[in-house]
Amino acid sequence: MLQIRCKNTNKSKSFPEGSSLLDVYQEFADEIQLPYPVVSAKVNNTSQGLKFRLFQNRDVEFLDAREGSGHRVYVRSLCFVLYKAVCDIFPNSKLFVEHPLSGGYYCNMKKRNNEGPTDEDIARIKSRMEEIVNLDMPFRRFEVTTEETVRVFSERGFSDKVKLIETSGQIYTDYYMLGDTVDYYYGPLVPSAGYIGVWGLERYGEGMLLRVPDKKNPLILSEKREQPRTFSMFAEKVRWDIIMRLSNAGDVNKAILNGHASELIQVSEALQEKKIVKIAEEVDARFRSADNPIRIVLITGPSSSGKTTFCKRLSIQLLACGLHPISFSTDDYFVNRVDTPLLPNGQYDFDNIKAVDSDLLEDHLTRLMNGERVEVPEYNFTTGKREYNGKKLKLQNDSILIMEGIHALNPMLTANIPDEKKYKVFVSALTSISLDDHNWIPTHDNRLLRRIIRDYNKGAYTARETIKQWRNVCEAEEKWILPYQENADAMFNSALNIEFAVLRTHAEIILASVPRNCPEYAEAHRLLKFIHYFIPVSDKEIPPTSIMREFVGGSSFKYRR
């Protein structure tokens, strides 16, 4: 008999060897106080599906769709239901689950004649999905040799999955079946389609929007938000992928194996520089406009999006246009640490808009715009106090302010400055490729890996500490940063196609340092598994001005903190 401790109840019970997590849950169900249906579990801090069988003593924590790994299990399973419905209604069609958007996931579909879906097609697919859910079709998992998995997908013409699996370096690989439909997912699924009770499918642009449950209340759909600029930015990403002949991790791995890593780096950097030049030229044109010329560029983005390096590279291009950019950071206007608002757990809430002295910042901006000379503060992050060290700024005829910070686009900071005087830029790492046609790479993962590496290299935080903070960081972004991204005049994608191959060489040893007996191990283990899909590449050919240098080190730019 096994001893299984349920972490939800902190009680242990005995079970026969080979018992499934479903068996365990049924024994503990009456005592587990979860407000929403259980969809997955963590076994010794590693995410597993509910069909997972136990053969040794284990700690088990059951999860609903609010928790990160539980939500991912739910959404993966929903994507398979969508794919199954598409295959049943339109055999030999192609489905692409491309990226998160508007509270769901944007999906593109090409029928056998290469046409996209009509409204009638989407209605038929949705109806078939409802049938699959009502039939409670089981998800079946098969673990076989990698050679056998490659054969299974080769026979069905899934070149994206074949390239991914062939280059993964794994001896055994698992795949899933739903009815007679086969697919591959890099994490567990729910036991059967009947678990998928909250979802939606509707027209979005030329494709479809797969709507998913709200992360705080999985019994309702996530709020739909119109994001035309973000959608356009993703469309630009697809065009870049076409230029580079890359669309998934397998393509990147094949290119690396064929000796093209250096070329991928050079082209990716050139495409980013081209975009920065375009933004600089637009700023220059509007600065020199006879009608309401702009005088300030506002730059923001979520954590580890690369906004600081972007700001420096944009400044260089503005110099090349004949302008004199003056950098101005909202960080210097933090209130003294003792006055910083607190989170419910008592920790400082540095992401709160009230952590910035917005009145002083706007007063200084207004005076600068009026041509006055202003002594501006410098924030001492060691003492937690604002200091005046004699730094004075004054705008000349050819000067333009460049203000960077997480709240730069929040209208509270610049309410008294006319909108026509501002040019707003939103920087984000919108991951440029997918693992395969049905497995997207969350932009959060890209930024989290960057932050883990940077924090570790600077000696600021361990990987465990960074992972522990990450949920609060993302919640703050949802509240204070992301609501303003659609107000931007320009959006810049800081992700590189070859980025994960480079990050792997830095992240592996750092993630491996997270102890197995702590809750953060689950995320570290998931990220390690994920980056192993990419063949590692040295960063030696990453240029010193690259945004990636902000995180892996070796930048020619100087950074504070």
Image: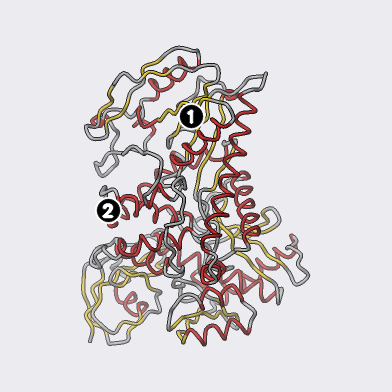
Q: Which residue is mark 1?
A: 402
Q: Is residue 380 above or below residue 495?
A: above
What mark, if any, has residue 465 been given in the picture? 2
Q: Along the line of sight, which residue is nearer the eye, 120 or 452? A: 452
Q: Amino acid at mark 1?
A: Ile
Residue 417 is situated, as x and y percent measured from the top left of the image, at 52, 20
Residue 304 is situated, as x and y percent measured from the top left of the image, at 41, 47
Which marked residue is nearer to the observer: mark 1 or mark 2? 1
For the point 40% across and 30% down, which residue is it? 330
Q: Which quarter of the figure is the C terminus placed in?
A: top left
For the point 54% across and 50% down, which residue is it? 269
Q: Earlier in the sequence, mark 1 or mark 2?
A: 1
Q: Quadrant of residue 532?
A: bottom left
Question: Is the C-beta separation of discs 1 and 2 under 8 Å?
Answer: no
Residue 519 is situated, as x and y percent measured from the top left of the image, at 28, 62
What mark, if any, has residue 367 been given in the picture? none
For the point 57% across and 71% down, which residue is it? 81
Q: Residues within 10 Å of mark 2 (few under 14, many from 20)?
A: some
